[in-house]
Each structure stands twice: as structure tokens, then as C-alpha cells.
Image (cartoon, rainbow, N blue to C red):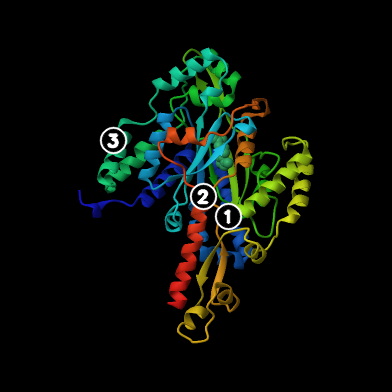
Amino acid sequence: MPTVSFISPDDIRKGFSKAMSDMYRAEVPLYGALMELVAEINRGVLDADPRLAQHLQRTGELQRLDMERHGAIRLGTAAELATIGRLFAVMGMQPVGYYDLTPAGVPVHSTAFRAVHESALQTSPFRVFTSLLRLELIENPDLRAFAEAALAKRSIFTPRALALIEQAEKHGGLGAADADEFIRQALETFRWHHTATVTAAQYQQLSDQHRLIADVVAFKGPHINHLTPRTLDIDQVQAAMPGKGITPKAVIEGPPRRNCPILLRQTSFKALDESIAFTDAQGSHSARFGEIEQRGVALTPKGRALYDQLLNAARDELGAFPNEGNAARYMALMTQHFQAFPDNHAQMREQGLAYFRYFATEKGLAARGQADRPRTLDALIAAGHVDVEPLVYEDFLPVSAAGIFQSNLGDAAQSHYVANANQAEFEQALGRQTLDELKLYEQTQQRSIDECTQALLA
Ligand code: OOG
Ligand code: NI
């Protein structure tokens, strides 16, 4: 097959992200309501702040905003993780980062599948937070064996999806008709099932061990459990949610509100109770929820260390998991501790706390070839020949993810695991290493500097 007829993986991802969103909206009407609310508030923010609109236009975030979303799934076995990695690779998604959720009492470890190059992210920034259950954390040996057997019996991919993955790997891509079929077949893995594969009593036993274990083991496949649109003002959406019949969790995860957003702020609404046919009786299960997020600048290792330090200090002082009862105090503590994090881009840049992208300006281009033109990056910026824009954070935060998991599992689901992070085991299951997100930001930043040099100084 001639390579020229292949559809680009980025376009397959774009098509898949749209198909997933349509499926989820049809199945979970509240997701549709949330999307409308987010779109309305984003429009308001852009109308009120034309400068922000200009900045987002320059970085390309404005153009991708309406299609921007992430989802999450939870897998049961190493083989499932390895195959999902191959499935996502067909759409140009790589595993980025390693997240250990056991310190928060959630028996999984995770990665985020996403595009890595800024131009690919521009076509479609779709991401999937993907967790692997750690069955070794089930203490009861009989229950563990039961869970293993149940997972060994299931096949979460359609035969046609598997065949198309192999075809894409063998030929280096998919043609138009195959890409369309791949999207339809791949979607089946993420679909909700109203029937469980276990009896009501077995479900209860799994759930008593941990609700997340029941969510993975008792079903035919790893249903997508949320899809998260990106908002430009999460506080406004949070405040407007109750008016739309949506009840958000008590606190927004991540950094407090700032003039210059950093990393990621997230909030979610509780999982829906959905009726399920167990093999012997009718019952219910809750897994699917809604979430929104606001993204800010990616932090360097130094910036991230400062973020972690301030977050930990605020949480230590609170002395408990943030919840409804202590939400006001938590937010006050966060605001107070985060005073120590500079809230303007110039300072963050000078102190090496965040990543940026550099763009040659009209003025810079006009001065090309002039003998006295500035030559260093700082001088080019000072002279207005180069503009600086924050590089958006594309990843997740483990403490925030734990908060999102917890709010949807209910507080009763908090357990304490002695297990540690085990990235090596995760990567062995995946069949490859996860990428270091910090290197990716560093590379994007460097490419933008190289482009400026090319454009202005060559
Ligand atoms: C994933 C929770 C984490 C996020 O945005 O941090 C997450 C899950 O519940 O499976 O989605
Ligand atoms: Ni999420």
C-alpha cells in the first residue's frame, strides 16, 4: 500500500476524540450541559479580555479550545495496558508521565496518553488518563484469584480493532476507510455496559475491598469514566454549576486562583448511580462523572518543586483531606501559602520557574539584517523583536487526580496501602518506557528559540 494514502495519526486522534465526545454526550446528558456551560463562560471570558484572546490566538490555544478534552479509563491487566498503548499509538498518542496513586489510597498507577509535539497537539490535544489496577494490593487471596480469573476471561478489544492495530503497525498507517473503521471499532472498548460479568454478591465483595476494584473487574470493558472540557475560568464554571443542576465537589484541585495560571486546576461532579444487570440480579453501580479543568503554564523542575512544597505546606496545616467541612479554610491556606509563588510571567521566567515559547514579531522581522539589531534572547525581548508566551501544561497532577478519584468513590473508599510507586513494573506491563514530560516542555521551548534565531538572526 503506498504510504501517501495514509491518514495522519493526528487526524485519526481528532476524529476519535470527536466520536468519543458524541458517544459520551449521548450516554451522559449532564456532560452536554457542562460543555454548553463551559463554552458560554469561555466566550464571556474572551469577550471581556481581548488581550487574553490575542495571547491564546498566538499560541494556538484559542483554535484548539473547543475540541480540547481529556478522558480517563481504568484497566485490569498488563496485557490490556500493552494493547491500549498500541491502540493509542495508531492515533499518535504516547504514554507521558507516571502517576502513583497509592499514597492517596487508590490501588492504581497511571500514565497519560497524549500527543507530544506542539504541532500534533495543535491538531488535537486529546488525552486519556489511563490507570492500571494493582491486583497485588488485594489482601484476600481468594478474592484476588477471583479477580484475576474474571479479568483473564475478558477481551476488551474487538477482533477488528486488533486487526487494524496490527495492520497500522505493519504498514505504517491506515488509509481513509480503515481509519474510519478503526475509530468506530476502537470506540467499542470505551463504551458503557449495562450488564456486569459477575453476580451481585461477587460485585459486593469486590466493592467492599475497594469500589475501584469492582469498577474494573465486574465489567466487560474499561468504560470511559469522564470527559473533561477545558475552561478559561474554572471559578466561574464552579459557581454556575448548581444553577444547571450540577453539584460540584467542594474544592477545586490544584493551585489557587491567580492572575497567571500555573499547571492545572480541576473540579468534578459526583458519579451517577446507574442501574446494572448482574448475572443473577438487578443492582446499581456508579463510575461515570463529569469534570472541568483550567490549564496554565507548565513549570520547570524548580517551579514544580516550589508548587509541591507550597501545596504540601497548605495541606499539612489543614491536617486532613480537603472536604466540604474544611473547604473555606483550605482555600484560605492555599491562597496564603501561594503568595510565595511569583504571579507574573516575567518573574517566573527570570527565576526559571516555568516554560515559555518565543515568537518573532513583525518588528523583529522588519529589523532583520540591520547591523545594530539585538542579538541575545533577552535583548530581543526587551527590544520587542521577540514575544514571550507561557507554554501550556499538557499533563496531570497526582494529588489532584487522587482528589478526583476520591470524590467519585466516596470517602468510605479511602484505604491505606503500604505499597510504593513502581514505575518499572508499570513500564514492564506497558511494554515500553513512559516519556518524561519535563523533557517534552524543554524541547518545545528550545524549538521556539531555534525558530526565532532562524527567523531573526540567520
Ligand atoms: C481518573 C482520575 C484522575 C484527572 O483529571 O486527574 C483524572 C479516574 O478516576 O479514573 O481524571
Ligand atoms: Ni480527569
Residue 123 percent location from the top left of the image:
42, 55
Residue 2 percent location from the top left of the image:
20, 52
Which numbered tag is attached to residue 163? 3
Residue type at mark 3: give it.
Ala
Q: Which one is earlier in the sequence, the residue at label 2 or at label 3?
A: 3
Q: In the picture provided, is 120 more to the left or to the right than 327?
A: left
Disc 1 residue crowd, few under 14, some 14–19, many 20+, Cα 10 Å: many
The structure residue drawn at horizontal position 75% and vertical position 46%, both measured from the top left corner, is: 331
Q: Quadrant of residue 417?
A: top right
Which numbered tag is attached to residue 298? 1
Q: Which image quarter has ligand 2?
A: top right
Give the residue furthest to the front: 424
Height in image: 260 above or below 186?
Answer: below
Q: Which one is earlier in the sequence, the residue at label 1 or at label 3?
A: 3
Which numbered tag is attached to residue 437? 2
The structure residue drawn at horizontal position 73% and vertical position 36%, both measured from the top left corner, is: 323
Height in image: 65 above or below 312?
Answer: below
Residue type at mark 2: give it.
Glu
Residue type at mark 1: give it.
Ala
Residue 25 percent location from the top left of the image:
49, 40
Depth check, front residue: 423 or 75: 423
The quarter of the picture where the C terminus appears is bottom left
